Image (cartoon, rainbow, N blue to C red):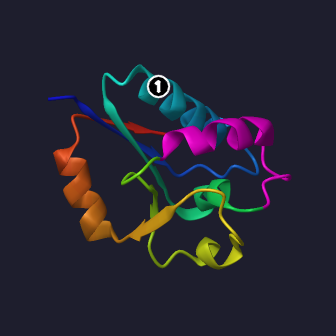
Amino acid sequence: MKPKVLILVTSDPRTTHRPSEAVRIAAGVGAWKKAEVQLYLRGPAIRVAGEWVDDLVREDDLVRYLPLTVGPGRPLWVQAGAAELSDLGATPVEVEPIDDRELARRCAESTYILRF
């Protein structure tokens, strides 16, 4: 069975490159097909999944790599009920809001958890 890698992103993409690095790493590790990689965005990091990313740090990496992090049956997880959800517009990838209880369950099922 493949290890499961959960990448949690909570940093604000308007002020730091960390969210774009997390997306780039998720796309790169997922391309190996040696692990199941899942990306979760919380709080201000949800802006990464938005239609408008022009004002985010390293927006070109987000545009290039975010579509590679999702696939059939593997949507981008985001914090349910977050205020940023209303500002996303038409998201370029499939987004699935999950609550904290579901996040805890999925963390428990993960082999590795990385936080950015």
Element assignment for label 1: helix
Picture residue at 46% right of the left edge, 25% below the top? 31
Q: Quadrant of residue 75?
A: bottom left
Decide: is 21 above or below 87: above
Decide: is 64 above or below 40: above
Decide: is 56 above or below 85: above
The quadrant of the picture occupied by the N terminus is top left
Q: Position of residue 46 (x, y in %)?
A: 59, 60
Q: Residue furthest right?
A: 54
Q: Quadrant of residue 57?
A: top right
Q: Residue furthest left?
A: 1
Residues drawn in magenta: 52-70
Q: Position of residue 58 (x, y in %)?
A: 77, 37
Picture residue at 65% right of the left edge, 38% below the top? 20
Q: Quadrant of residue 92?
A: bottom right
Residue 28 falls within the magenta-colored stretch = no
Q: Nearer the viewer, residue 110 or 10?
A: 110
The residue tagged 1 is 31
Picture residue at 75% right of the left edge, 47% below the top? 15
Judge left or right: residue 60 versus residue 36: right
Q: Position of residue 85 (x, y in %)?
A: 60, 74
Q: Nearer the viewer, residue 74 or 56?
A: 74
Residue 57 falls within the magenta-colored stretch = yes
Picture residue at 26% right of the left edge, 66% below the top? 102
Q: Residues within 10 Å of mark 1 (few under 14, many from 20)?
A: some
What amino acid is labelled 1 in the image?
Answer: Ala
Q: Nearer the viewer, residue 101 or 71?
A: 71
